[in-house]
């Protein structure tokens, strides 16, 4: 008997869409194998008793955050590696140009002593904060239950590393221009001991040990990162009043990356809550649990800025507005 085998026109996972898959869908969806077997997320011997499998089972499969098919999540920006690197390369060229222009006019030499103190105590130590934000994004990348979520977290980790490097770069520039100051010498001490940073440090350290993937996503992307970004926004506003357009430009560019993080994070919340009402309860509960720490962190940081209490209230207000926009 003759039989004719008809080949599929696309991947089986995407066939139901009744259309040609986009480049984003082809290179981003259904790339993980960890969710195929509950007891053997990592198909290594000896499974399922392998500690990695036990970890994934406890903190991912048994998370209060549940969905029948995580791979259906889509990044609202449909971002892929080729586009991400092209876009960020353009942004890096822009930043290089801004730095060069300010170097040519002797920008750092003209900074006021009072503002140099703020930079030394409130800006250059933020490379430690950036490290913590990068580590948090890396954890989501490692344990996320779908490759589409992994991709978003991976690009976010790249963003955090980008700004870690830029803060370090600016630290060295300021140290070279003002060697009598504590630039490149005292940042760790400020991070570990300055009252301004202790709220952010406590917040990030606790985020990094929130192992449940759902809670970690909420604590990191919906609370801690938002709090950190809003303190940066306030620092940028102070920079303008001290005639430091360079820091303001760097912050504005960094916040572009943060806006993308908020877009995919908000979309993931909608994806979860549309599927299961229980997810709304879980996410709301986590936000409520982590927000007091975030408010304390924002307040401690902003009170050390010249704008003080007004800056703290403004930053907290924007964080709360973002939470309301999630409609949970």
Image: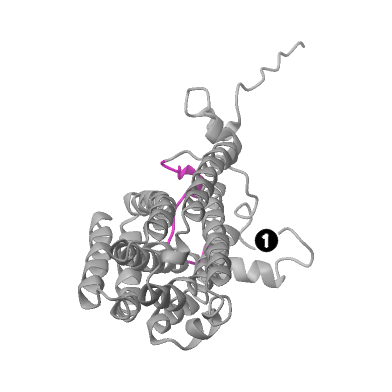
Compared with 99, 192 (above or below) is: below
Where does the magenta region start and end?
60-76
Q: Residue at x 25, y 55 (%)?
A: 325
Residue on which the image places disc 1: 40
Specify whether residue 302 is painted magenta. Answer: no
* Nearest to the observer: residue 266 or residue 128: 128
Answer left or right for 39 relative to 136. Answer: right
* Nearest to the observer: residue 101 or residue 266: 101
**Spot occupied by residue 189 in the image (x, y as percentages of width and height):** 52, 86
What residue occupies the far top of the structure in this picture? Answer: 2
Answer left or right for 111 relative to 189. Answer: left
Which quarter of the image is occupied by the N terminus? Answer: top right
- In the rendered view, how is the structure colored? one colour
**How many C-alpha atoms fall within 10 Å of the one at disc 1: few (<14), some, or many (≥20)?**
many
Answer left or right for 154 relative to 5. Answer: left
Question: Circle 1 — which element?
Answer: loop
> In the rendered image, which quarter is residue 50 located in?
bottom right
**Spot occupied by residue 11 in the image (x, y as percentages of width and height):** 61, 30
Compared with 173, 19 (above or below) is: above
**Spot occupied by residue 130 in the image (x, y as percentages of width and height):** 51, 67
**Spot occupied by residue 315 in the image (x, y as percentages of width and height):** 27, 67
Q: Can the viewer see residue 226 in this picture?
A: yes
Q: Residue at x 42, y 84 (%)?
A: 198
> In the rendered image, which quarter is residue 183 located in?
bottom right
Compared with 180, 88 (above or below) is: above
Specify whether residue 74 is painted magenta. Answer: yes
Q: Main secondary structure of the magenta part?
A: loop
* Nearest to the observer: residue 40 or residue 177: 177
Which quarter of the image is occupied by the C terminus? Answer: bottom left
Q: How many marks?
A: 1
What residue occupies the far right of the structure in this picture? Answer: 45
Q: Can the viewer see residue 64 in this picture?
A: no
């Amino acid at each position: 008997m003759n039989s004719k085998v008809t080949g599929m026109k696309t991947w089986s996972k995407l066939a139901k869409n009744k259309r040609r898959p986009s480049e984003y869908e082809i290179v981003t969806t259904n790339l993980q194998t960890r969710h195929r077997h509950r007891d053997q997320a990592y198909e290594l011997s000896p499974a399922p008793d392998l500690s990695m499998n036990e970890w994934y089972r406890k903190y991912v499969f048994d998370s209060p955050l549940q969905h029948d098919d995580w791979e259906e999540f889509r990044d609202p920006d449909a971002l892929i590696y080729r586009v991400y690197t092209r876009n960020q390369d353009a942004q890096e060229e822009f930043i290089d140009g801004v730095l060069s222009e300010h170097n040519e006019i002797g920008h750092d030499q003209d900074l006021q002593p009072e503002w140099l103190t703020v930079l030394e105590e409130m800006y250059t130590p933020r490379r430690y904060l950036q490290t913590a934000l990068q580590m948090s994004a890396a954890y989501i990348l490692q344990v996320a239950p779908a490759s589409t979520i992994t991709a978003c977290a991976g690009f976010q980790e790249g963003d955090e590393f980008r700004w870690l490097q830029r803060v370090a770069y600016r630290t060295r520039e300021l140290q070279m221009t003002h060697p009598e100051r504590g630039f490149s010498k005292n940042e760790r001490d400020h991070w570990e001991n300055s009252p301004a940073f202790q709220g952010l440090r406590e917040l990030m350290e606790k985020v990094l040990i929130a192992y449940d993937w759902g809670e970690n996503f909420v604590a990191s992307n919906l609370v801690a990162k938002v709090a950190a970004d809003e303190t940066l926004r306030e620092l940028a506003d102070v920079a303008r009043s001290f005639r430091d357009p360079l820091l303001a430009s760097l912050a504005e560019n960094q916040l572009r990356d943060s806006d993308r993080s908020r877009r995919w994070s908000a979309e993931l919340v909608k994806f979860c809550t549309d599927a299961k009402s229980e997810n709304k309860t879980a996410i709301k509960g986590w936000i409520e649990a982590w927000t007091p720490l975030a408010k304390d962190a924002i307040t401690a940081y902003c009170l050390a800025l010249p704008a003080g209490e007004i800056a703290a209230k403004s930053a907290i207000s924007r964080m709360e507005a973002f939470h309301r926009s999630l409609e949970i």
